[in-house]
Image: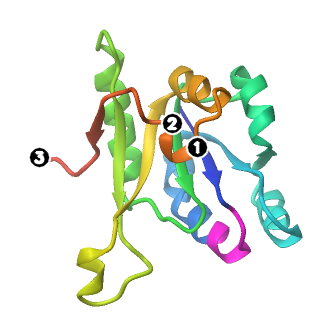
Amino acid sequence: MLSVLVFDADEPMDLTITLSSLVAGVVEGVLREVVVVEPQGEAALKVADHAGCSVHSRAELGHTPLALKGDWLILMRAGDRLPANWPERATRHGEDQSRAKTPRGGRFVLPTREARGWRRWLARRQSAYLVPKAHAMSRLSAGAPWQGVAKGIGLDRLADREA
């Protein structure tokens, strides 16, 4: 089971875009909870509340890691959208890693949204990270930025496999 941590929720529309991409995980029974970390502004807080998300500060997350329900965490930025088949990819990765002696994390490469046309090929690709809860919580409690939580653990690119 998974929990999702959404960071940098400044704009309500960005948060809405991200939450809409998570619906597939709820429908498939893979996603247990969504936590919005330190939303900025009343409007973003209302969106999180209406969607049934938990809201926590970074300090609260560092002190209560066991309160998160999922064994694996997806960390992403508000405004980013996971691919349509992300629940299947995340579930397959978690099952594969449950048999591994030292589990590896995963990385979803997300489409760029800022750049248009040929500039998108030069733009830096955004990522969402799938990491074991214990690793993520130790990095967050040590003060790592959310993008740095996946450091110190091997990452596999979570892409479609040929059937």
Q: Position of residue 84 (x, y in %)?
A: 38, 61
Distance CA(mark 2)–CA(mark 1): 7 Å
Q: Which residue lies furthest to the left in this view?
A: 162
Q: Quickly name the residue at label 2.
A: 149
The answer to whether residue 95 shows anywhere in this view is yes
Distance CA(mark 3)–CA(mark 2): 31 Å
Inspect the image, locate mark 1, and give the three-letter code of the amino acid beneath it. Answer: Pro
Q: Quickly name the residue at label 3.
A: 163
Q: Image quarter for residue 17?
A: bottom right
Residue range highlighted in magenta: 9-16
Kindly identify the residue that appears in the image at 44 percent across and 59 percent down: 82
* Secondary element at tag 3: loop
Against 2, is 127 above or below? below
* Secondary element at tag 2: loop
> Any magenta on residue 12?
yes
Q: Quickly name the residue at label 1.
A: 145
Against 80, is 122 above or below? below
Mark seen at residue 54: none
Kindly identify the residue that appears in the image at 65 percent across and 34 percent down: 143
Kindly identify the residue that appears in the image at 33 percent across and 14 percent down: 102
The answer to whether residue 30 shows anywhere in this view is no
Of the numbered discs 3 and 2, the one sitting upstream in the chain is 2
